[in-house]
Amino acid sequence: MGNEMQLDEINPFHFKRPGAPYISARYEKGQVELSQVVSWLQKRRRESDLLLVEGIGGVLVPLGEGYTVLDVLQKVRMRVMVAAVNRLGVINQVLLTVRALQGAGVEEVGCVMMDVGERGFAVRTNWEVVREVIFPVPVFWVPYMGCKALGVREIKKSVKKVQKTLEEILGTGRLVSA
């Protein structure tokens, strides 16, 4: 977003202490009510062509007194993409998360597996297993771009690959080329 929006406009519920928002809020500002989060998301959704919302650590993370990310998702119907780092244990993480979402009635679910450059049997086979165990949920792959992926040269080399991956994940053909 560059400097187009202030932090409070992007995320009015941010805290200095890293941790579950429920606890961080308690120590800094009091509590954030479910209705506040739902209202803010609905407003931003109306104002945006595309709204991306980060789930802050998982669908069962407590956000406030008596509610989690999953409770917000049940109130504000949206497409959910489970982000998963491809490493040992990812199959369990993805399966638990997808099943929790489906069990709560979230209808549009997908998974994005991110490669981190590790090589090993589990990492090489996770993609195939995840695709099988959560089928028909779509699984997308984000390749590892290297440890210098944010360098200008690396970005220029990989921009088409990144754009294609993002268009696939977002289900759009309308990303502007760089």
Image: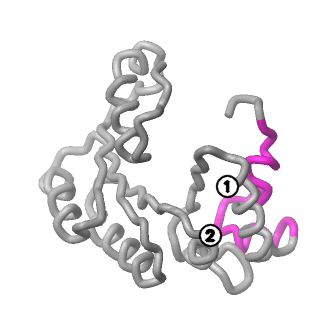
What is the secondary structure assignment of the residue under circle 2? Answer: loop
Which quadrant would the N terminus be assigned to in this image? top right
Residue 18 position within the rendered picture, expressed as x and y whole percent measured from the top left:
67, 59
* Real-space Cα separation, disc 2 to disc 1, in angstroms: 10 Å
Using a 10 Å C-alpha cutoff, classify the residue at mark 2 as few (fewer than 14 neighbours), some (14 to 19) or many (20 or more): some
Give the colour scheme of this rendering.
Answer: one colour
Q: Quadrant of residue 121?
A: bottom left
Q: Quadrant of residue 137?
A: bottom left
Please tell me which residue lies in front, 174 or 52.
174
What is the secondary structure assignment of the residue under circle 1? Answer: helix
Image marks 2 and 1: residues in contact by CB distance under 8 Å: yes
| Residue denoted by label 2 | 76
Badge 2 or badge 1: first in the primary sequence: 1
Residue 12 position within the rendered picture, expressed as x and y whole percent measured from the top left:
79, 56
Using a 10 Å C-alpha cutoff, classify the residue at mark 1 as few (fewer than 14 neighbours), some (14 to 19) or many (20 or more): some
Q: Which mark is residue 117?
A: none
Residue 167 position within the rendered picture, expressed as x and y whole percent measured from the top left:
40, 39
Q: Which mark is residue 45?
A: 1
Residue at horizontal 37 percent and vertical 72 percent from the top: 98
Residue at horizontal 65 percent and vertical 65 percent from the top: 19
Please tell me which residue lies in front, 52 or 18.
52
Asked if residue 160 is positioned above or below residue 38 in the image, the reply reads above
Where does the magenta region start and end? 5-29
